[in-house]
Every structure is written in C-alpha cells, then in structure tokens.
C-alpha cells in the first residue's frame, strides 16, 4: 500500500532513490514556516526521520504565517506543535523534537549534529551559520542553509564533496559510437545490404546501419578521416540522401538528421577527463567507492576503451523492422556487458591493491557506474566562511552592474548586512515601526562598508532596494518561506538520493520580479 | 496604571508589507490597515483544482491575508495523490478533493472561509466566475486552462480607443508542474498575453505512428499502445476503455506482454503500462510547493499592490542544478480570445450582403467568401450548400436588424484572407458599431414589440 502512495515519485527516483530517502535522518533548526515548509515536502516523500530543534513558543503572530501551528497551540512549544502536525502527514516517518535554541546548541553541543544525514538550518544569523558550517564539515554531515526575509531569501548547500553517478541530465547524447564503431557492430552492419530490392525492407533498415556504412564508405575514400569541414558534412548528408529510393523513407530522413553523431568528436568529454585527472582518482585505502571506480575508469579508457568510456548500452527508438532493431539492441547490450566485465575486474584489482575486500563494491553499483560513466558529476562547495571572507569580487561587480540580476545580487549583500546590523544594534533594520529613517541610513552604511571590505569599492546598491530591506523588517512571509523551503527540500532530495545534480552556489530569491539568481562566489 | 501593550497582530509578518509604504510597489498601492482588512473581508479568490497545486494554493492564500476562498475540483482522492496532496489522508480516499481540502484548511487556519465546489468547471454559470477578484489555476490539462482563459477573457470589454476597461479585467495566475520542472505565469486579460496568445508554447503530444504499433513495434511502449489502441477496440468493439477499471488495465497489460513476447521485446511492466496508457506525469511535493508559492505570491501582489509583479512568465527547472527564468511574452494583438477585434463602423441600413462585400475591400482583412457568425447564431454560411440556401434570405436584410438592433457587438467572420500574397483560411473577431443608432430607433422597437 505504501508503495502505491509513492508511485508518482518512484517514477522519478526509483526504488533505490526511495530507499535512500527512507534511510535518511534529517535535522531541522528553527520551525518557523521556512523550516516547516521545507520539512513538509520531505515528510510527504517518506524521509526516514526528522528531528526539530527550536526553543520558542507559538505566538499569536505565528498563526498568520505557519501552517503547522493552530490556535490551540499558542503558548506551547513550537517544536512540539509543528512536530505533531508534520507527523500527521506521513506516519511512516519517525518525528522527534527538541526544545532548545539552535544557536545555543551550536555553541554548547556541536557533537549533537554528527548523528544526522543532513541538517536543514533555517533563519540562522551569520555567526551561527559559520559555526555550524565548521561543525558539519568536520563531522561530514550534509548541510543546507535556508533563509526567508521579506520578499527575499536564499538557499545554500554546504558539503565538502558530493559525487554523483546517476546524474540523470535532461538532455544527453546517446552512445551509438557511429564515429567509432567496434568490430562486432561493423560485422553486424556488413550482414545487411542497403541495396535490398524489396521496398519495404529498404525503408526499414535502421539509421545506425545506414550511418555506419556511409561513414565507412566515406573514410575509405578520404584517407581514413571522417567529415570535418562544413563542405564535407554537407557532402556526407547528400551521400545519404542519394541512397533513398522514394521520398517516404523515414529511416533515411532519420539518418540525415542523426548525421551529426558521425561528426562528433570521439572519446570522453573534457568534464569526465577532468574527473579522471582529479587527485582523488589516485585510489588509496581512504578512497570512497566512487573514486575507486573512477580509478578503474581511468585505466579502462587508457587500455581496453581505447579512449572511450564503457559503452552505455541502450539505443534510442528509430524506424526499423522489429528484427533489425532487436538484433541491433543485442549488439549494443553485448558490448556494454563486455565493457562492464572488464571494469568489474579492474575495480576488484584496485580494491585488492588498496587493502579492501574485492567484493565490497557490488556488481549492480559497478554496472550503474558503467552506464553513467559519461555523465558523472563531482560537486564541491566552498565553506561559507571562505565565501564570506574572499568571495569572487568580479562576480559580485558583474552582477551588481547587470540590469536583470542587480536586484538579487543586492539582496545577497543586504542579507549579510542585516546580520551585521543586528550584531551592532540588537535588532533588524525596520523590525519595529519607529526609527525607520535612521535604520535605512544605518543599513546603507553597513552595506557599503561590507562591500568595501569585500574589495568592491565603487559598487553601489540602489537606495530603493535598501529601503525595501528595511520595509521587510525581518518578516517571514508564508509564500516566500514556502518557495525557498520548497527549493531547499528539492536540494535535500537530490543530495540524499544522490540522483540529479544539486545547485552549485547560493540561490538568491528575488520575490519582487522573480529575477532570482544562482551565485557562485 | 497598567502599560498598554500594542495588541498582537495575527498578520504580524504580512503587516510589514501591507501597512508600510515602499518604493518598489504597484501603481495603486495604498498601505494601511484598510487595505489589509479589505483584503481579508472583501476579496474573493477562486482556486481551480484541489490537487497537487490546489492544496498548496489554498494553504498559501489562507496564510497571505485572504479569507474568502472558493475551490472547484471534479475529482475524488486517490492513494497516489498522497505523496504531495498534503491535505488528504489515507481515510479520505474516495472523497471529493474540493470538500476535504476546504475542510482541512479551515480547521487549521481559523477565520478562513472556503467554499468547495465538487463539479466540472464547465458546469458552472459564467457569472459564477465573475464573482471573484482573481482566479488561481492549479490545473493539469491544456483544455481546462483554455476554458477558464476563455471565460475570464470573455468578461473583458474595450473602450472606443482600444484600451481595456479596468473594471472588466479578470486576472489569472496559472501554474503547472512535471517532475522537477514547472512554470508560473500572470495573465491580465488585455494587458499581458492570455493563454491563447501563447498557445504555441505547448508542444504537441507525442503519438506513435500507427504503422509502428501495427507492424514494427520496437519497444515496450509500442506493445502497450498496440494493446490499448488497436487490440482493445478489435476485441471489445464499442465498449470504451476505462483506465481506472483495474480489469481493463490488466487486460491491456496481458495483451502487451503477449505482443512483446511475440516480437522478443523486453521491458513491459504493469507500472509502465499504467504510465503509458494514463499518460502519468511524475509528481513530487517540492515542485508543486515552489510553483504554487510563486502563484500565491503574485496573487498577493496583484491584489494589494504591495510590490511589483512578475512580468509575466516564470520557468523553473530543478533537476540539473537550479534554473529559474523570467520571460516577458507579448500579447497577440489579433488574439481572438483577449483582443478587442478590428473595429468596423456601419450604417444601420447596410445589408448583410453589403457587409460581406466590404470585408473583401477592407485593407486589414481582404477577406473573401466570408461566413458571418453573431454569438451563437450563424447569420450566413458559404458552405455546405444546404445551409447556404437556408441562410441566403439573410443577405438582403440589414445587418443591424440581424444583430438584434444593438448599437455595437462582436461578430466572427470566417473566410479566405490574402496574407503575404498567400491565400489562407482566416477566422477574425470584429467589433461592429452602428452609427445613427439612437434612442428614437430604440423606442420604435419597444413600441413595435
């Protein structure tokens, strides 16, 4: 029954992804709407456990922005109340709460955080943010910061290293090797005669066969080279068209459209090359499974692969007779299997060499690695304090000057400035109704001084934006909390399932015109 | 003497935006308690759909200062909804979505009134939709969006100088999601493009060629659609296939397996069968939450003026990193749904025949062989011959009379237009205004009646 409930999401991340979610333990700091909205999406998705840390009581004003509290809970522990309402959403999730201030916990009990898979830290000011970042980095616990402030806010992932095998990109070229066919594919193609007299058979020859033959014909008459200039590419396409015997031959039309796959460069992409050249690709006893497999990949590419990664193995649909298609599929599957077996051997050898059990990385894992070898991703995040002390000045200046994104960049600076303001004046600018003009002026000074500290002398922030920031008065609007909380929950899912690619940087939300920006500083 | 503490406001956070003046605000923003209280007491919002987006929208709007909401949805709750439609529980399966959603939000947020409508959107009177200040859409089909768009834009009236009349503008916010992708848009009829203006944004649905299904299947989906679209009608004749009947789905699955085995094709599973036949779109809570929040935020801003608004289309993709983009689409001036239509001024004496002749000469139209429609009534049809003969007597009558002697109204004309030296079929909306149609004439009509 529970599996039917998750049907719509299983179609995205599969049973393996779901299992990873169900094993995860998430800690939430502060259960205002930003935190509860982020957590709500994870509870619905079936995360293993949640622990809410918040020392405050439910206030009357919370009834206007938080769905996980109600009238009867005013005066009671906010952590207790929100925990109970979140539990209602999914009884498979283990929900706990701790009545304590997150700032105090960060100060007095850093080891508390080691037990979690991931911490979602909401509405923390800069000082606690930096401290928590150090604690989680040290304990190797994933961290997602979220803040919602008037019509702005941000989401920031902080993890030392996040490696992804199953990155599931939206668009990725299939692995047909039309520019580099292997012997078995060539032999198969040879068994099919393009000049078959039967018209039906003629138009049901799959384009893979057509293109391998045409490429072969071409290279034989061009000193072993594939088409490279614009002229040659056009000529090649004309060559294909010349083999058509009628205008309704979809297979030939597909061949012309797919001709670019013949011109594509051989071998692995520069991104994969970079991963193979990474220092972590030198396997040692402390290497993660990912890097052990990368080490094997590196060896494979230099040896059996002859410059190529293991074959992915699947082919896209194409006009073809069923028989040809099935046979073609088998050829590709056989090569993918053969490449996998080579990789598996290399992985086992490397494991032995570094003193690990050669069976400690399972075959399904290695198989998945092989299938996704061209799509691997490595994400590394700067520590927050490094970003704060030495951000990319050129990036800041560029964004502040950009017509569309100066708002988001301005908000990034102002979000830091309001925390500095609070450290000096014990309140957020505009938090109370009186003294607005004074707060505006003080915030401006604080923000400009911050920009100067960062090395951005001469950069300005629009006065209108500074005014708005004071107007916001550190308010936590439900819709903004739901938006950034939603983004945060999505990043958590990607980090926990290790599928898809998490955001690299800080996402600054601009709720005025929605021209939000992902900043990598 | 006791200190008088300022009474706490339930809308403590919203107050900062609604009670305080600002610079980056809407054109008619009057901050203050009156704005806040008017929004709470008088503004009515309709949420269309009580599913993944609708549940989120109701919560978001209830916590954005709105107290008078309606929600309409014709569906009942299913188990597969529960991973994201958070207002529903296991024991609610089978109940109407609109009713349960309304009840749950009202239980949690005291003071909000939500009227549920367990019905199809087409079954409501047009005037029902006119009662709302703004309509928020949480729909999952193009047809439903087109319908509501047509209704909302139908209320729009234009002045003589082609400016939309403010009080007839019915804004909409529309959201859509699929997996990690989504969009949120603002539609202000007459100002921003309407749904119809940008219909080209939606790619046509992928359909497999019949010969592939019938003769050369290659993958599991082909086998499934063969069983669904070819074998079922063959065996079951007139009985239509219902994907919600388990026996029907099982039958298709079994047939798909047989076909797959026949051709040696792997991969047919029950889950895939359901997915292909029902065109199941993967869905998760987070994307729905994000898109709904964007829609609700725009609703808050449009109604209150407390900030500038989205102009006018936001796309979101959270699978590969994170990408949001704002595009400002432009109205199609000739849009048949939200446009004013080309203005034609006529004498009350002009016959229908003369009118049709004029269309051919009109520089903006150059429309030949025109058929003319006034609302639901066909005034003249060029084809088929039977109907042409039936309507022929109208040609000699004054158009003014045929249109019920109103001073001005909309007609649609259909014919062959010369565009860029090419002949094309063309359907155009015209605003017909009759000169010399005054009170005297009206009185005559009244006396005559």
Image (cartoon, rainbow, N blue to C red):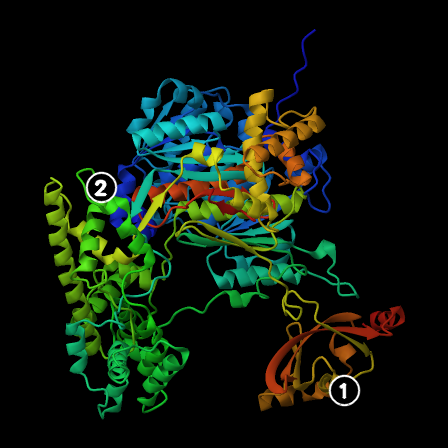
- Helix, strand or loop at label 1? It is helix
Left or right: B90, with B414 as reference point: left
Q: Position of residue A37 (x, y in %)?
A: 45, 37
Left or right: B141, with A98 as reference point: right
Q: Nearer the viewer, residue B88 or A188?
A: A188
Q: Nearer the viewer, residue B97 or A398?
A: A398
Q: Position of residue A204 (x, y in %)?
A: 26, 82
- Extreme residue toward the right, this view: B440
Q: CA distance from mark 1 to mark 2?
A: 84 Å
**Which residue is painted at 23% across and 50% down in the image?**
A294
Up the image or down, B271 lies above or below B302; here it is below
Q: Position of residue B126 (x, y in %)?
A: 62, 59
* Discs 1/2, front: 2
The answer, for residue B63, to whether it is visible in the render is no
Q: Chain of mark 2?
A: A
Return the residue at label 1: B354
Return the residue at label 2: A288
The local crowd at label 1, few if under 14, some if 14 to 19, many if 20 or more residues have their Cα within 10 Å, is some
Q: Chain of mark 1?
A: B
- Extreme residue toward the bottom, this view: A197
Q: Are marks 1 and 2 in contact (CB under 8 Å)?
A: no
Q: Nearer the viewer, residue B323 or B348?
A: B323
Up the image or down, B220 lies above or below A301; here it is below
Query: For residue A101, which quarter of the picture?
Result: top left
Q: Position of residue A49 (x, y in %)?
A: 31, 33
Query: For residue B156, which quarter of the picture?
Result: bottom right
Q: Nearer the viewer, residue A507 or B279?
A: A507
Left or right: A518, with A46 as reference point: right
């Amino acid at each position: 029954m529970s599996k039917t409930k998750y049907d719509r999401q299983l179609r995205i991340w599969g049973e393996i992804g779901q299992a990873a979610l169900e094993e995860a333990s998430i800690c939430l700091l502060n259960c205002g709407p930003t935190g509860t909205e982020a957590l709500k999406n994870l509870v619905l998705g079936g995360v293993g456990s949640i622990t809410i840390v918040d020392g405050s009581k439910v206030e009357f004003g919370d009834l206007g922005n938080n769905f996980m509290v109600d009238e009867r809970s005013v005066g009671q522990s906010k952590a207790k109340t929100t925990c109970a309402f979140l539990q209602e959403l999914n009884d498979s999730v283990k929900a706990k709460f701790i009545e304590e201030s997150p700032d105090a916990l960060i100060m007095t009990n850093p080891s508390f955080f080691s037990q979690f898979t991931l911490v979602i830290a909401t509405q923390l000011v800069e000082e606690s943010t930096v401290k928590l970042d150090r604690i989680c980095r040290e304990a190797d616990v994933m961290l997602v910061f979220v803040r919602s402030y008037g019509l702005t806010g941000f989401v920031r992932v902080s993890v030392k290293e996040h490696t992804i095998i199953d990155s599931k990109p939206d668009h990725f070229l299939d692995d047909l090797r039309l520019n580099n066919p292997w012997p078995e594919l060539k032999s198969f193609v040879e068994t099919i005669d393009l000049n078959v007299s039967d018209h039906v058979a003629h138009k049901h020859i799959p384009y893979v066969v057509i293109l391998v033959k045409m490429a072969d014909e071409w290279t034989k008459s061009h000193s072993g080279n594939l088409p490279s200039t614009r002229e040659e590419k056009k000529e090649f396409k004309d060559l294909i068209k010349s083999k058509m015997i009628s205008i309704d031959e979809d297979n030939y039309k597909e061949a012309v459209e797919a001709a670019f796959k013949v011109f594509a460069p051989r071998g692995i992409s520069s991104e994969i090359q970079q991963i193979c050249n990474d220092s972590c690709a030198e396997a040692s006893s402390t290497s993660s499974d990912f890097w052990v497999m990368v080490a094997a990949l590196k060896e494979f590419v230099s040896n059996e692969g002859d410059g190529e990664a293991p074959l992915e193995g699947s082919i896209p649909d194409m006009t073809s007779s069923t028989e040809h298609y099935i046979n073609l599929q088998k050829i590709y599957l056989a090569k993918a299997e053969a490449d996998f077996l080579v990789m598996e051997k290399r992985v086992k050898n490397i494991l032995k060499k570094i003193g690990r059990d050669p069976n400690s990385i399972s075959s399904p894992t290695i198989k998945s690695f092989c299938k996704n070898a061209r799509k691997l991703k490595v994400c590394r995040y700067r520590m927050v304090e490094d970003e704060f002390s030495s951000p990319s000045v050129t990036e800041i200046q560029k964004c502040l000057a950009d017509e569309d994104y100066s708002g988001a960049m301005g908000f990034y600076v102002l979000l830091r400035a309001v925390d500095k303001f609070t450290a000096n004046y014990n309140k957020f600018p505009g938090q109370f109704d009186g003294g607005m003009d004074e707060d505006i002026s003080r915030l401006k000074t604080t923000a400009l001084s911050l920009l100067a500290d960062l090395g951005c002398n001469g950069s300005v922030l629009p006065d209108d934006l500074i005014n708005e920031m004071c107007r916001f008065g550190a308010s936590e609007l439900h819709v903004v909390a739901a938006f950034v909380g939603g983004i945060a929950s999505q990043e958590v899912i990607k980090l926990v399932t290790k599928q898809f690619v998490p955001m690299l940087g800080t996402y600054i939300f601009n709720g005025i015109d929605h021209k939000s920006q992902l900043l990598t500083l | 003497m006791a200190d008088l503490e300022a009474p706490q406001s339930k809308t403590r956070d919203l107050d900062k935006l609604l009670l305080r003046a600002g610079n980056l605000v809407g054109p008619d923003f009057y901050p203050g308690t009156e704005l806040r209280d008017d929004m709470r007491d008088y503004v009515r919002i309709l949420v269309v759909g009580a599913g993944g987006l609708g549940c989120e929208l109701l919560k978001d709007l209830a916590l954005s200062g709105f107290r008078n909401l309606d929600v309409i949805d014709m569906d009942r709750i299913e188990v597969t909804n529960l991973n994201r439609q958070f207002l529903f529980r296991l024991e609610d399966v089978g109940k109407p979505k609109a009713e349960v959603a309304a009840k749950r939000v009202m239980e949690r947020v005291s003071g909000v009134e939500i009227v549920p409508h367990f019905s199809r959107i087409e079954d409501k009177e047009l005037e029902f939709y006119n009662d709302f200040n703004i309509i928020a859409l949480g729909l999952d089909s193009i047809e439903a969006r087109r319908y509501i768009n047509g209704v909302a834009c139908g209320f729009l009236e234009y002045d003589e100088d082609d400016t939309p009349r403010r009080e007839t503008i019915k804004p909409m916010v529309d959201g859509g999601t699929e997996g990690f992708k989504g969009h949120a848009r603002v539609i202000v009829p007459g100002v921003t493009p309407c749904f119809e203006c940008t219909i080209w944004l939606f790619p046509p649905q992928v359909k497999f060629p019949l010969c592939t299904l019938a003769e050369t299947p290659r993958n599991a989906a082909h086998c499934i659609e063969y069983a669904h679209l070819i074998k079922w009608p063959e065996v079951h004749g007139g009985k239509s296939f219902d994907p919600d009947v388990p026996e029907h789905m099982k039958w298709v699955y079994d047939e798909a397996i047989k076909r797959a085995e026949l051709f040696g094709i792997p991969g047919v599973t029950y889950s895939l069968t359901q997915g292909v036949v029902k065109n199941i779109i993967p869905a998760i809570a987070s994307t729905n939450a994000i898109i709904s929040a964007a829609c609700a935020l725009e609703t808050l801003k449009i109604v209150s003026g407390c900030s500038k608004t989205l102009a006018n289309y936001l796309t979101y993709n959270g699978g590969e990193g994170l990408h949001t983009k704002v595009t400002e689409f432009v109205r199609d001036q000739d849009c048949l749904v939200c446009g004013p239509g080309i203005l034609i001024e006529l004498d009350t004496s002009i016959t229908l025949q003369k009118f049709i002749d004029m269309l051919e000469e009109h520089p903006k139209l150059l429309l030949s062989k025109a058929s003319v429609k006034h609302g639901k009534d066909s005034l003249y049809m060029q084809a088929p011959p039977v109907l042409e003969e039936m309507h022929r007597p109208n040609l000699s009558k004054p158009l003014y009379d045929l249109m019920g002697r109103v001073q001005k109204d909309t007609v649609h004309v259909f014919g062959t237009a010369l565009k860029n030296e090419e002949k094309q079929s063309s359907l155009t909306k015209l605003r017909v205004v009759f000169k010399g149609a005054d009170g005297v004439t009206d009185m005559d009509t009244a006396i005559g009646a």
